[in-house]
Image: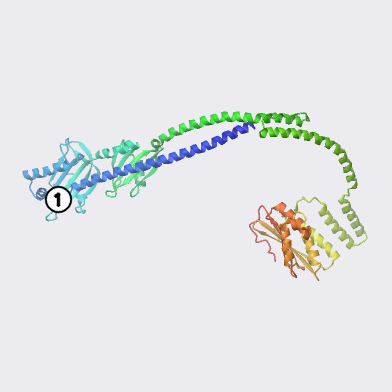
Protein backbone atom coordinates (compact mmCIF):
# COMPACT_ATOMS: atom_id res chain seq x y z
CA UNK A 1 0.00 0.00 0.00
CA UNK A 2 2.91 2.31 0.74
CA UNK A 3 4.21 1.81 -2.81
CA UNK A 4 0.75 2.33 -4.25
CA UNK A 5 0.33 5.59 -2.37
CA UNK A 6 3.70 6.80 -3.65
CA UNK A 7 2.74 5.86 -7.20
CA UNK A 8 -0.65 7.57 -6.84
CA UNK A 9 0.89 10.75 -5.42
CA UNK A 10 3.46 10.88 -8.20
CA UNK A 11 0.84 10.09 -10.81
CA UNK A 12 -1.54 12.77 -9.53
CA UNK A 13 1.25 15.32 -9.61
CA UNK A 14 3.05 14.24 -12.77
CA UNK A 15 -0.07 13.94 -14.94
CA UNK A 16 -1.30 17.54 -14.43
CA UNK A 17 2.25 18.93 -14.64
CA UNK A 18 2.97 16.97 -17.81
CA UNK A 19 -0.36 17.88 -19.34
CA UNK A 20 -0.03 21.58 -18.50
CA UNK A 21 3.56 21.57 -19.76
CA UNK A 22 2.48 19.94 -22.98
CA UNK A 23 -0.36 22.42 -23.48
CA UNK A 24 1.96 25.30 -22.67
CA UNK A 25 4.66 24.09 -25.05
CA UNK A 26 2.13 23.34 -27.76
CA UNK A 27 0.44 26.71 -27.35
CA UNK A 28 3.79 28.51 -27.25
CA UNK A 29 4.93 26.65 -30.34
CA UNK A 30 1.76 27.56 -32.26
CA UNK A 31 1.80 31.16 -31.02
CA UNK A 32 5.47 31.64 -31.89
CA UNK A 33 5.03 30.10 -35.31
CA UNK A 34 1.88 32.13 -35.95
CA UNK A 35 3.55 35.38 -34.89
CA UNK A 36 6.68 34.61 -36.88
CA UNK A 37 4.54 33.82 -39.93
CA UNK A 38 2.54 37.02 -39.55
CA UNK A 39 5.71 39.12 -39.09
CA UNK A 40 7.41 37.45 -42.05
CA UNK A 41 4.37 38.00 -44.25
CA UNK A 42 4.15 41.64 -43.18
CA UNK A 43 7.85 42.30 -43.77
CA UNK A 44 7.76 40.51 -47.12
CA UNK A 45 4.73 42.52 -48.15
CA UNK A 46 6.44 45.77 -47.10
CA UNK A 47 9.56 44.82 -49.07
CA UNK A 48 7.47 43.89 -52.11
CA UNK A 49 5.57 47.17 -51.90
CA UNK A 50 8.89 49.04 -51.72
CA UNK A 51 10.07 47.23 -54.86
CA UNK A 52 6.77 48.13 -56.56
CA UNK A 53 7.19 51.79 -55.65
CA UNK A 54 10.76 51.81 -56.91
CA UNK A 55 9.76 50.28 -60.23
CA UNK A 56 6.76 52.62 -60.45
CA UNK A 57 9.15 55.58 -60.02
CA UNK A 58 11.32 54.19 -62.81
CA UNK A 59 8.30 53.84 -65.05
CA UNK A 60 7.38 57.41 -64.23
CA UNK A 61 10.89 58.57 -65.14
CA UNK A 62 10.48 57.03 -68.60
CA UNK A 63 7.78 59.66 -69.29
CA UNK A 64 10.15 62.62 -68.80
CA UNK A 65 11.16 62.80 -72.52
CA UNK A 66 7.58 63.82 -73.27
CA UNK A 67 8.02 67.01 -71.28
CA UNK A 68 11.41 68.11 -72.69
CA UNK A 69 10.96 69.99 -76.00
CA UNK A 70 14.66 69.85 -76.82
CA UNK A 71 14.72 66.08 -76.47
CA UNK A 72 11.58 65.83 -78.56
CA UNK A 73 13.19 67.93 -81.26
CA UNK A 74 16.58 66.19 -81.36
CA UNK A 75 15.08 62.66 -81.33
CA UNK A 76 13.52 63.48 -84.73
CA UNK A 77 16.72 65.05 -86.11
CA UNK A 78 18.56 62.74 -88.52
CA UNK A 79 22.07 64.04 -87.97
CA UNK A 80 23.91 64.19 -84.72
CA UNK A 81 25.73 67.43 -84.06
CA UNK A 82 27.28 69.13 -81.09
CA UNK A 83 24.01 70.70 -79.87
CA UNK A 84 22.18 67.37 -80.07
CA UNK A 85 24.89 65.58 -78.07
CA UNK A 86 25.01 68.32 -75.46
CA UNK A 87 21.24 68.61 -75.04
CA UNK A 88 20.56 64.85 -74.85
CA UNK A 89 23.64 64.36 -72.66
CA UNK A 90 22.38 66.87 -70.09
CA UNK A 91 18.98 65.20 -70.08
CA UNK A 92 20.49 61.73 -69.56
CA UNK A 93 22.76 63.10 -66.83
CA UNK A 94 19.69 64.39 -65.05
CA UNK A 95 17.90 61.06 -65.38
CA UNK A 96 20.97 59.13 -64.24
CA UNK A 97 21.27 61.08 -61.01
CA UNK A 98 17.62 60.65 -60.05
CA UNK A 99 18.49 57.22 -58.59
CA UNK A 100 21.88 56.07 -57.45
CA UNK A 101 21.26 52.42 -58.38
CA UNK A 102 21.02 53.20 -62.13
CA UNK A 103 23.79 51.46 -64.01
CA UNK A 104 23.03 53.18 -67.30
CA UNK A 105 20.26 55.15 -68.99
CA UNK A 106 19.78 55.01 -72.76
CA UNK A 107 17.92 57.20 -75.24
CA UNK A 108 17.50 55.93 -78.81
CA UNK A 109 16.23 58.37 -81.46
CA UNK A 110 14.02 57.61 -84.41
CA UNK A 111 17.07 56.80 -86.57
CA UNK A 112 18.44 54.15 -84.08
CA UNK A 113 21.18 56.44 -82.83
CA UNK A 114 21.80 55.47 -79.19
CA UNK A 115 22.84 57.92 -76.49
CA UNK A 116 23.62 56.77 -72.93
CA UNK A 117 24.94 57.91 -69.60
CA UNK A 118 26.76 55.29 -67.51
CA UNK A 119 28.00 54.99 -63.97
CA UNK A 120 31.63 55.60 -63.01
CA UNK A 121 33.83 52.61 -63.69
CA UNK A 122 32.12 51.60 -66.91
CA UNK A 123 34.23 52.69 -69.85
CA UNK A 124 32.34 51.08 -72.68
CA UNK A 125 28.75 49.92 -73.32
CA UNK A 126 27.65 47.83 -76.27
CA UNK A 127 24.30 49.08 -77.53
CA UNK A 128 24.41 47.44 -80.93
CA UNK A 129 23.69 43.98 -79.45
CA UNK A 130 20.92 45.29 -77.20
CA UNK A 131 19.04 47.41 -79.76
CA UNK A 132 17.28 44.47 -81.50
CA UNK A 133 16.22 43.07 -78.12
CA UNK A 134 14.79 46.42 -77.04
CA UNK A 135 12.82 46.78 -80.25
CA UNK A 136 11.48 43.26 -79.91
CA UNK A 137 10.25 43.85 -76.36
CA UNK A 138 8.61 47.21 -77.20
CA UNK A 139 6.93 45.90 -80.31
CA UNK A 140 3.13 45.86 -80.15
CA UNK A 141 2.94 47.31 -76.60
CA UNK A 142 2.29 50.93 -77.60
CA UNK A 143 3.57 53.44 -75.07
CA UNK A 144 3.23 51.09 -72.06
CA UNK A 145 6.42 50.56 -70.08
CA UNK A 146 8.06 47.13 -70.25
CA UNK A 147 9.85 45.56 -67.30
CA UNK A 148 12.69 43.20 -68.21
CA UNK A 149 13.93 40.79 -65.56
CA UNK A 150 17.45 39.95 -64.63
CA UNK A 151 19.91 39.86 -67.54
CA UNK A 152 23.59 40.49 -68.23
CA UNK A 153 25.07 43.46 -70.09
CA UNK A 154 28.63 43.62 -71.36
CA UNK A 155 30.74 46.48 -70.04
CA UNK A 156 34.35 47.34 -70.78
CA UNK A 157 36.35 44.43 -72.20
CA UNK A 158 35.42 40.96 -70.88
CA UNK A 159 33.39 42.37 -68.00
CA UNK A 160 29.64 42.24 -67.37
CA UNK A 161 26.98 43.52 -65.00
CA UNK A 162 23.74 41.95 -63.72
CA UNK A 163 20.83 44.37 -64.18
CA UNK A 164 17.11 44.60 -64.73
CA UNK A 165 15.59 47.14 -67.10
CA UNK A 166 12.60 49.40 -67.62
CA UNK A 167 11.84 50.33 -71.25
CA UNK A 168 9.28 52.59 -72.92
CA UNK A 169 8.60 53.84 -76.44
CA UNK A 170 8.87 57.64 -76.76
CA UNK A 171 6.25 59.35 -78.87
CA UNK A 172 6.12 62.83 -80.29
CA UNK A 173 3.78 65.11 -78.41
CA UNK A 174 2.86 66.90 -81.62
CA UNK A 175 2.48 64.08 -84.18
CA UNK A 176 2.01 61.13 -81.75
CA UNK A 177 4.47 59.12 -83.85
CA UNK A 178 7.07 56.86 -82.30
CA UNK A 179 10.32 58.82 -82.22
CA UNK A 180 12.55 56.53 -80.12
CA UNK A 181 13.06 54.55 -76.91
CA UNK A 182 14.21 55.20 -73.36
CA UNK A 183 15.83 52.43 -71.29
CA UNK A 184 16.94 52.29 -67.65
CA UNK A 185 19.40 49.54 -66.54
CA UNK A 186 19.28 49.11 -62.77
CA UNK A 187 21.91 47.24 -60.76
CA UNK A 188 20.46 44.03 -59.28
CA UNK A 189 22.22 44.74 -55.99
CA UNK A 190 19.78 47.56 -55.32
CA UNK A 191 17.46 44.85 -53.90
CA UNK A 192 20.03 44.09 -51.22
CA UNK A 193 19.25 47.33 -49.37
CA UNK A 194 15.51 46.65 -49.55
CA UNK A 195 15.70 43.02 -48.37
CA UNK A 196 18.56 43.43 -45.89
CA UNK A 197 16.23 44.35 -43.03
CA UNK A 198 13.97 41.37 -43.81
CA UNK A 199 16.91 38.93 -43.68
CA UNK A 200 18.37 40.42 -40.50
CA UNK A 201 15.08 40.17 -38.60
CA UNK A 202 13.88 36.79 -39.88
CA UNK A 203 17.36 35.17 -40.12
CA UNK A 204 16.28 33.86 -43.52
CA UNK A 205 17.14 34.34 -47.16
CA UNK A 206 15.13 36.55 -49.52
CA UNK A 207 14.55 36.08 -53.21
CA UNK A 208 12.73 37.94 -55.98
CA UNK A 209 11.31 36.10 -58.98
CA UNK A 210 9.94 37.81 -62.07
CA UNK A 211 6.61 37.11 -63.72
CA UNK A 212 8.22 34.49 -65.96
CA UNK A 213 9.45 32.43 -63.02
CA UNK A 214 13.10 33.46 -63.42
CA UNK A 215 15.25 34.49 -60.52
CA UNK A 216 15.85 38.23 -60.25
CA UNK A 217 17.69 38.43 -56.93
CA UNK A 218 18.67 36.08 -54.09
CA UNK A 219 20.35 37.10 -50.85
CA UNK A 220 23.07 35.16 -49.10
CA UNK A 221 24.53 32.23 -51.04
CA UNK A 222 21.90 32.43 -53.74
CA UNK A 223 18.80 30.38 -54.28
CA UNK A 224 18.63 26.62 -54.78
CA UNK A 225 16.43 25.06 -57.41
CA UNK A 226 14.35 23.39 -54.65
CA UNK A 227 13.63 26.75 -53.06
CA UNK A 228 12.63 28.30 -56.38
CA UNK A 229 10.52 25.30 -57.40
CA UNK A 230 8.71 25.25 -54.04
CA UNK A 231 7.98 28.97 -54.31
CA UNK A 232 6.55 28.70 -57.82
CA UNK A 233 4.36 25.73 -56.84
CA UNK A 234 2.97 27.23 -53.62
CA UNK A 235 2.74 30.96 -54.32
CA UNK A 236 -0.81 32.15 -54.88
CA UNK A 237 -2.11 35.28 -56.53
CA UNK A 238 -1.53 37.74 -53.66
CA UNK A 239 0.42 36.96 -50.50
CA UNK A 240 0.70 34.20 -47.93
CA UNK A 241 3.02 31.56 -46.50
CA UNK A 242 3.73 27.83 -46.59
CA UNK A 243 6.09 25.24 -45.12
CA UNK A 244 8.28 22.82 -47.02
CA UNK A 245 11.28 20.54 -46.49
CA UNK A 246 14.66 21.03 -48.12
CA UNK A 247 17.67 18.79 -47.44
CA UNK A 248 15.94 17.31 -44.40
CA UNK A 249 15.20 20.70 -42.80
CA UNK A 250 11.83 22.42 -42.49
CA UNK A 251 11.44 25.96 -43.82
CA UNK A 252 8.76 28.64 -43.54
CA UNK A 253 8.35 30.78 -46.65
CA UNK A 254 6.42 34.05 -46.71
CA UNK A 255 5.74 35.57 -50.12
CA UNK A 256 4.19 38.63 -51.76
CA UNK A 257 2.98 38.68 -55.37
CA UNK A 258 2.93 42.15 -56.92
CA UNK A 259 -0.31 43.05 -58.62
CA UNK A 260 1.57 45.62 -60.79
CA UNK A 261 4.54 43.61 -62.05
CA UNK A 262 3.68 39.98 -61.19
CA UNK A 263 7.05 39.68 -59.45
CA UNK A 264 7.22 37.53 -56.31
CA UNK A 265 9.13 38.69 -53.24
CA UNK A 266 9.74 35.89 -50.73
CA UNK A 267 11.78 35.11 -47.62
CA UNK A 268 12.87 31.58 -46.68
CA UNK A 269 13.17 31.08 -42.87
CA UNK A 270 14.44 27.86 -41.20
CA UNK A 271 11.94 26.71 -38.60
CA UNK A 272 14.85 25.80 -36.34
CA UNK A 273 15.74 29.47 -35.98
CA UNK A 274 12.12 30.38 -35.20
CA UNK A 275 11.70 27.62 -32.61
CA UNK A 276 15.18 27.80 -31.06
CA UNK A 277 13.91 29.93 -28.18
CA UNK A 278 11.10 27.48 -27.55
CA UNK A 279 13.57 24.58 -27.26
CA UNK A 280 15.52 26.47 -24.61
CA UNK A 281 12.35 27.19 -22.67
CA UNK A 282 11.33 23.57 -23.05
CA UNK A 283 14.59 22.38 -21.49
CA UNK A 284 14.16 24.79 -18.59
CA UNK A 285 10.59 23.60 -18.14
CA UNK A 286 11.72 19.97 -18.20
CA UNK A 287 14.34 20.58 -15.52
CA UNK A 288 11.76 22.42 -13.40
CA UNK A 289 9.30 19.54 -13.77
CA UNK A 290 11.93 17.01 -12.73
CA UNK A 291 12.74 19.05 -9.62
CA UNK A 292 9.05 19.29 -8.74
CA UNK A 293 8.57 15.55 -9.23
CA UNK A 294 11.64 14.77 -7.12
CA UNK A 295 10.33 16.91 -4.30
CA UNK A 296 6.90 15.33 -4.71
CA UNK A 297 8.46 11.85 -4.48
CA UNK A 298 10.19 12.78 -1.23
CA UNK A 299 7.02 14.23 0.30
CA UNK A 300 4.92 11.29 -0.97
CA UNK A 301 7.33 8.83 0.67
CA UNK A 302 7.02 10.59 4.03
CA UNK A 303 3.23 10.78 3.86
CA UNK A 304 2.80 7.18 2.73
CA UNK A 305 5.06 5.93 5.52
CA UNK A 306 3.12 7.93 8.12
CA UNK A 307 -0.20 6.66 6.77
CA UNK A 308 0.72 2.99 6.37
CA UNK A 309 2.69 2.42 9.59
CA UNK A 310 -0.46 1.91 11.74
CA UNK A 311 -1.93 -0.29 9.02
CA UNK A 312 1.18 -2.46 8.93
CA UNK A 313 0.90 -2.92 12.70
CA UNK A 314 -2.75 -3.88 12.28
CA UNK A 315 -1.85 -6.38 9.52
CA UNK A 316 0.63 -8.11 11.85
CA UNK A 317 -2.05 -8.46 14.53
CA UNK A 318 -4.55 -9.77 11.95
CA UNK A 319 -2.10 -12.48 10.93
CA UNK A 320 -1.90 -13.56 14.58
CA UNK A 321 -5.70 -13.69 14.71
CA UNK A 322 -5.64 -15.73 11.50
CA UNK A 323 -3.49 -18.32 13.26
CA UNK A 324 -5.92 -18.50 16.18
CA UNK A 325 -4.42 -15.98 18.60
CA UNK A 326 -7.31 -13.85 19.84
CA UNK A 327 -5.33 -12.31 22.72
CA UNK A 328 -4.32 -9.24 20.70
CA UNK A 329 -5.18 -5.58 21.19
CA UNK A 330 -4.59 -2.35 19.23
CA UNK A 331 -3.85 0.93 21.02
CA UNK A 332 -4.97 3.74 18.64
CA UNK A 333 -2.85 6.90 18.85
CA UNK A 334 -5.07 9.24 16.84
CA UNK A 335 -8.80 9.68 16.52
CA UNK A 336 -8.76 9.55 12.71
CA UNK A 337 -10.08 6.93 10.27
CA UNK A 338 -7.19 4.57 11.03
CA UNK A 339 -7.74 5.04 14.77
CA UNK A 340 -11.44 4.25 14.31
CA UNK A 341 -10.45 1.17 12.30
CA UNK A 342 -8.30 0.02 15.23
CA UNK A 343 -11.15 0.58 17.65
CA UNK A 344 -13.52 -1.46 15.48
CA UNK A 345 -10.85 -4.14 15.17
CA UNK A 346 -10.78 -4.46 18.96
CA UNK A 347 -14.58 -4.71 19.02
CA UNK A 348 -14.42 -7.34 16.30
CA UNK A 349 -12.03 -9.44 18.38
CA UNK A 350 -14.42 -9.26 21.33
CA UNK A 351 -17.34 -10.23 19.10
CA UNK A 352 -15.39 -13.12 17.58
CA UNK A 353 -14.70 -14.51 21.03
CA UNK A 354 -18.41 -14.34 21.88
CA UNK A 355 -19.42 -15.92 18.56
CA UNK A 356 -16.94 -18.76 18.93
CA UNK A 357 -18.48 -19.55 22.26
CA UNK A 358 -21.98 -19.48 20.76
CA UNK A 359 -20.92 -21.61 17.77
CA UNK A 360 -19.58 -24.32 20.02
CA UNK A 361 -22.89 -24.46 21.87
CA UNK A 362 -25.10 -24.47 18.77
CA UNK A 363 -22.97 -26.85 16.71
CA UNK A 364 -24.05 -29.85 18.72
CA UNK A 365 -27.74 -28.86 18.46
CA UNK A 366 -27.38 -28.38 14.71
CA UNK A 367 -25.81 -31.81 14.24
CA UNK A 368 -28.73 -33.47 16.03
CA UNK A 369 -31.25 -31.52 13.91
CA UNK A 370 -29.45 -32.43 10.67
CA UNK A 371 -29.54 -36.11 11.57
CA UNK A 372 -33.29 -35.93 12.15
CA UNK A 373 -33.79 -34.07 8.87
CA UNK A 374 -31.78 -36.67 6.96
CA UNK A 375 -33.81 -39.47 8.47
CA UNK A 376 -37.11 -37.78 7.51
CA UNK A 377 -36.04 -36.71 4.04
CA UNK A 378 -37.82 -38.43 1.14
CA UNK A 379 -35.78 -38.81 -2.01
CA UNK A 380 -37.88 -37.62 -5.01
CA UNK A 381 -36.10 -40.19 -7.15
CA UNK A 382 -38.04 -42.83 -5.15
CA UNK A 383 -41.26 -41.56 -6.79
CA UNK A 384 -39.74 -41.62 -10.27
CA UNK A 385 -38.42 -45.17 -9.77
CA UNK A 386 -41.79 -46.32 -8.35
CA UNK A 387 -43.61 -44.84 -11.38
CA UNK A 388 -41.18 -46.67 -13.66
CA UNK A 389 -41.97 -49.94 -11.84
CA UNK A 390 -45.72 -49.32 -12.29
CA UNK A 391 -45.18 -48.67 -16.02
CA UNK A 392 -43.22 -51.91 -16.44
CA UNK A 393 -45.95 -53.80 -14.58
CA UNK A 394 -48.67 -52.25 -16.79
CA UNK A 395 -46.81 -53.17 -19.97
CA UNK A 396 -46.34 -56.72 -18.74
CA UNK A 397 -50.17 -56.90 -18.43
CA UNK A 398 -50.76 -55.23 -21.84
CA UNK A 399 -52.36 -52.12 -20.33
CA UNK A 400 -50.81 -49.59 -22.75
CA UNK A 401 -52.84 -46.61 -21.61
CA UNK A 402 -51.70 -46.92 -17.97
CA UNK A 403 -48.14 -47.57 -19.19
CA UNK A 404 -48.20 -44.43 -21.38
CA UNK A 405 -49.75 -42.33 -18.64
CA UNK A 406 -47.17 -43.55 -16.12
CA UNK A 407 -44.32 -42.95 -18.61
CA UNK A 408 -45.43 -39.40 -19.37
CA UNK A 409 -45.89 -38.62 -15.69
CA UNK A 410 -42.39 -39.98 -15.03
CA UNK A 411 -40.93 -37.79 -17.77
CA UNK A 412 -42.66 -34.76 -16.26
CA UNK A 413 -41.30 -35.57 -12.81
CA UNK A 414 -37.82 -36.37 -14.11
CA UNK A 415 -37.68 -32.99 -15.92
CA UNK A 416 -38.95 -31.17 -12.83
CA UNK A 417 -36.68 -32.73 -10.18
CA UNK A 418 -33.44 -31.85 -11.95
CA UNK A 419 -31.63 -28.71 -10.79
CA UNK A 420 -33.39 -25.48 -11.71
CA UNK A 421 -30.13 -23.85 -12.83
CA UNK A 422 -29.43 -26.65 -15.32
CA UNK A 423 -29.09 -25.31 -18.90
CA UNK A 424 -31.92 -26.30 -21.27
CA UNK A 425 -32.84 -25.39 -24.83
CA UNK A 426 -36.07 -24.27 -26.43
CA UNK A 427 -36.35 -27.76 -27.92
CA UNK A 428 -36.22 -29.37 -24.44
CA UNK A 429 -38.77 -26.91 -23.05
CA UNK A 430 -41.14 -27.60 -25.94
CA UNK A 431 -40.72 -31.36 -25.46
CA UNK A 432 -41.71 -30.92 -21.81
CA UNK A 433 -44.83 -29.01 -22.90
CA UNK A 434 -45.69 -31.75 -25.43
CA UNK A 435 -45.46 -34.39 -22.64
CA UNK A 436 -47.77 -32.24 -20.54
CA UNK A 437 -50.29 -32.03 -23.41
CA UNK A 438 -50.05 -35.79 -23.98
CA UNK A 439 -51.13 -36.27 -20.34
CA UNK A 440 -54.03 -33.89 -20.95
CA UNK A 441 -55.02 -35.82 -24.10
CA UNK A 442 -55.30 -39.00 -22.04
CA UNK A 443 -57.37 -37.26 -19.38
CA UNK A 444 -59.46 -35.15 -21.77
CA UNK A 445 -59.54 -36.73 -25.24
CA UNK A 446 -60.29 -34.29 -28.11
CA UNK A 447 -60.45 -31.36 -25.69
CA UNK A 448 -57.09 -29.62 -26.21
CA UNK A 449 -54.77 -29.14 -29.19
CA UNK A 450 -51.15 -27.91 -29.24
CA UNK A 451 -49.44 -26.28 -32.27
CA UNK A 452 -45.72 -25.47 -32.15
CA UNK A 453 -44.49 -23.16 -34.91
CA UNK A 454 -40.88 -22.33 -33.92
CA UNK A 455 -38.07 -21.91 -36.50
CA UNK A 456 -35.36 -24.53 -36.44
CA UNK A 457 -32.61 -21.93 -35.81
CA UNK A 458 -34.31 -21.08 -32.49
CA UNK A 459 -34.67 -24.67 -31.27
CA UNK A 460 -31.14 -24.81 -29.80
CA UNK A 461 -31.37 -21.40 -28.14
CA UNK A 462 -30.43 -21.61 -24.42
CA UNK A 463 -33.38 -20.67 -22.20
CA UNK A 464 -34.44 -20.71 -18.58
CA UNK A 465 -36.05 -23.92 -17.40
CA UNK A 466 -39.83 -24.20 -16.89
CA UNK A 467 -40.92 -20.96 -18.61
CA UNK A 468 -43.43 -22.46 -21.08
CA UNK A 469 -45.20 -25.04 -18.88
CA UNK A 470 -46.65 -22.62 -16.25
CA UNK A 471 -47.94 -20.34 -19.03
CA UNK A 472 -49.43 -23.24 -21.01
CA UNK A 473 -51.03 -24.59 -17.82
CA UNK A 474 -52.63 -21.18 -17.17
CA UNK A 475 -53.89 -21.13 -20.76
CA UNK A 476 -55.47 -24.59 -20.35
CA UNK A 477 -57.17 -24.19 -16.98
CA UNK A 478 -58.10 -20.48 -17.15
CA UNK A 479 -58.71 -20.04 -20.86
CA UNK A 480 -59.60 -23.35 -22.51
CA UNK A 481 -61.25 -25.41 -19.74
CA UNK A 482 -64.26 -23.05 -19.38
CA UNK A 483 -64.66 -23.01 -23.17
CA UNK A 484 -67.07 -25.30 -24.97
CA UNK A 485 -65.50 -27.51 -27.63
CA UNK A 486 -61.91 -27.91 -28.80
CA UNK A 487 -59.33 -25.50 -27.34
CA UNK A 488 -56.10 -24.60 -29.17
CA UNK A 489 -52.73 -23.48 -27.84
CA UNK A 490 -50.12 -22.17 -30.25
CA UNK A 491 -46.45 -21.51 -29.44
CA UNK A 492 -44.46 -19.33 -31.85
CA UNK A 493 -41.12 -17.51 -31.78
CA UNK A 494 -39.23 -14.91 -33.77
CA UNK A 495 -36.33 -12.46 -33.57
CA UNK A 496 -36.92 -8.74 -33.11
CA UNK A 497 -33.63 -6.78 -33.26
CA UNK A 498 -31.68 -7.80 -30.13
CA UNK A 499 -34.61 -9.67 -28.59
CA UNK A 500 -36.33 -13.02 -29.01
CA UNK A 501 -40.10 -12.98 -28.73
CA UNK A 502 -41.78 -16.21 -27.58
CA UNK A 503 -45.59 -16.23 -27.74
CA UNK A 504 -48.18 -18.57 -26.24
CA UNK A 505 -51.62 -17.97 -27.82
CA UNK A 506 -54.90 -19.63 -26.88
CA UNK A 507 -58.39 -19.21 -28.27
CA UNK A 508 -60.05 -19.54 -24.89
CA UNK A 509 -62.54 -17.35 -23.06
CA UNK A 510 -60.06 -14.48 -22.56
CA UNK A 511 -60.43 -11.77 -19.92
CA UNK A 512 -61.95 -8.33 -19.70
CA UNK A 513 -59.95 -5.10 -20.09
CA UNK A 514 -59.95 -4.25 -16.39
CA UNK A 515 -58.58 -7.66 -15.38
CA UNK A 516 -55.97 -7.50 -18.16
CA UNK A 517 -54.88 -4.03 -17.02
CA UNK A 518 -54.40 -5.20 -13.41
CA UNK A 519 -52.55 -8.31 -14.56
CA UNK A 520 -50.04 -6.40 -16.70
CA UNK A 521 -49.60 -3.87 -13.90
CA UNK A 522 -48.91 -6.66 -11.41
CA UNK A 523 -46.22 -8.06 -13.74
CA UNK A 524 -44.46 -4.67 -13.56
CA UNK A 525 -45.14 -4.01 -9.87
CA UNK A 526 -44.51 -7.27 -8.03
CA UNK A 527 -46.05 -5.89 -4.83
CA UNK A 528 -49.53 -6.28 -6.38
CA UNK A 529 -49.07 -9.82 -7.67
CA UNK A 530 -50.92 -11.79 -4.99
CA UNK A 531 -54.30 -11.44 -6.73
CA UNK A 532 -53.15 -13.43 -9.77
CA UNK A 533 -51.21 -16.27 -8.16
CA UNK A 534 -47.54 -17.11 -8.57
CA UNK A 535 -47.26 -18.90 -11.95
CA UNK A 536 -46.84 -15.98 -14.36
CA UNK A 537 -45.11 -13.82 -11.78
CA UNK A 538 -42.57 -16.49 -10.96
CA UNK A 539 -41.67 -16.86 -14.64
CA UNK A 540 -41.64 -13.06 -15.10
CA UNK A 541 -39.29 -12.48 -12.15
CA UNK A 542 -36.91 -15.23 -13.27
CA UNK A 543 -36.78 -13.75 -16.79
CA UNK A 544 -36.01 -10.25 -15.48
CA UNK A 545 -33.30 -11.57 -13.15
CA UNK A 546 -31.65 -13.58 -15.92
CA UNK A 547 -32.12 -11.38 -19.01
CA UNK A 548 -32.40 -7.88 -17.49
CA UNK A 549 -35.18 -5.42 -16.69
CA UNK A 550 -35.94 -4.77 -20.37
CA UNK A 551 -37.10 -8.41 -20.66
CA UNK A 552 -40.24 -9.91 -19.20
CA UNK A 553 -43.83 -11.00 -19.87
CA UNK A 554 -46.67 -9.01 -21.42
CA UNK A 555 -50.26 -10.27 -21.73
CA UNK A 556 -52.90 -9.36 -24.33
CA UNK A 557 -56.45 -10.69 -24.11
CA UNK A 558 -59.97 -10.05 -25.31
CA UNK A 559 -63.14 -11.74 -24.04
CA UNK A 560 -64.37 -14.45 -26.36
CA UNK A 561 -61.27 -14.28 -28.60
CA UNK A 562 -58.43 -15.56 -26.44
CA UNK A 563 -55.22 -14.61 -24.69
CA UNK A 564 -51.67 -14.01 -25.91
CA UNK A 565 -48.69 -14.15 -23.52
CA UNK A 566 -45.44 -12.73 -24.96
CA UNK A 567 -42.06 -13.54 -23.44
CA UNK A 568 -39.49 -10.89 -24.42
CA UNK A 569 -35.90 -12.13 -23.93
CA UNK A 570 -32.87 -9.92 -24.55
CA UNK A 571 -29.91 -11.77 -26.07
CA UNK A 572 -26.23 -10.83 -26.36
CA UNK A 573 -26.42 -11.24 -30.14
CA UNK A 574 -29.10 -12.16 -32.65
CA UNK A 575 -28.89 -13.42 -36.24
CA UNK A 576 -29.06 -10.73 -38.91
CA UNK A 577 -31.22 -12.86 -41.19
CA UNK A 578 -34.64 -12.74 -39.55
CA UNK A 579 -36.52 -13.79 -42.67
CA UNK A 580 -36.30 -17.43 -41.55
CA UNK A 581 -38.47 -16.68 -38.50
CA UNK A 582 -42.15 -17.37 -39.07
CA UNK A 583 -44.46 -14.46 -38.17
CA UNK A 584 -46.92 -14.76 -35.30
CA UNK A 585 -50.56 -14.58 -36.28
Q: Visible in this render: residue 453?
A: no
Residue designated by label 1: 66
Pick the front one: 295 or 159: 295
State which quarter of the image contains the C terminus.
bottom right
Q: Is residue 279 left or right of residue 94?
A: right
What x and y, as percent, mark residue 46?
A: 30, 43
What x and y, as percent, mark residue 414?
A: 83, 54
Q: Is residue 119 left or right of residue 475?
A: left
Tell me what residue is drawn at x 64 percent, y 31 percent: 307
In the image, farthest residue toward the right: 397
- Mark 1 residue element: helix
What x and y, as percent, mark residue 527?
A: 74, 56
Tell me what residue is drawn at x 45 percent, y 40 percent: 27
What x and y, as percent, mark residue 247?
A: 39, 37
Q: Visible in this render: residue 381?
A: yes
Q: Is residue 295 left or right of residue 346?
A: left
Q: Quadrant of residue 81?
A: top left
How packed mark 1 is, by other alpha carbons closer than 10 Å (few <14, some 14-19, many 20 or more), is some
Amino acid sequence: MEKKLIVIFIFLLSLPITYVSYLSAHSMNKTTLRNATANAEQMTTNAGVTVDRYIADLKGSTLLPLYNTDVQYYMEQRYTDWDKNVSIGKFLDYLFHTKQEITAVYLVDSFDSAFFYKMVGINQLNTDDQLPRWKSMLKNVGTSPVLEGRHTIDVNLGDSREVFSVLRTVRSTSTLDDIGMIIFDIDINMFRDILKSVDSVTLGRSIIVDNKGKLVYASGDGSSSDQLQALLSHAGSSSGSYEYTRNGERYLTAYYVSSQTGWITAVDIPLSSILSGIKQNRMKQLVTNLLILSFALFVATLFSYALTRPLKSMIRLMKQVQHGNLDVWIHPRYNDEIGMLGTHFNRMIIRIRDLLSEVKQTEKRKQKADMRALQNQINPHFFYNTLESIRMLAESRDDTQIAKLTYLLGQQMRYSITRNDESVTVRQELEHVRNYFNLLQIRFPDKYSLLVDVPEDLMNLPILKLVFQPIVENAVFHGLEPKQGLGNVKITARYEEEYVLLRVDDDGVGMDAETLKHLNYSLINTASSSRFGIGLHNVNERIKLHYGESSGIQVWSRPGIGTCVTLRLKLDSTPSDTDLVLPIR
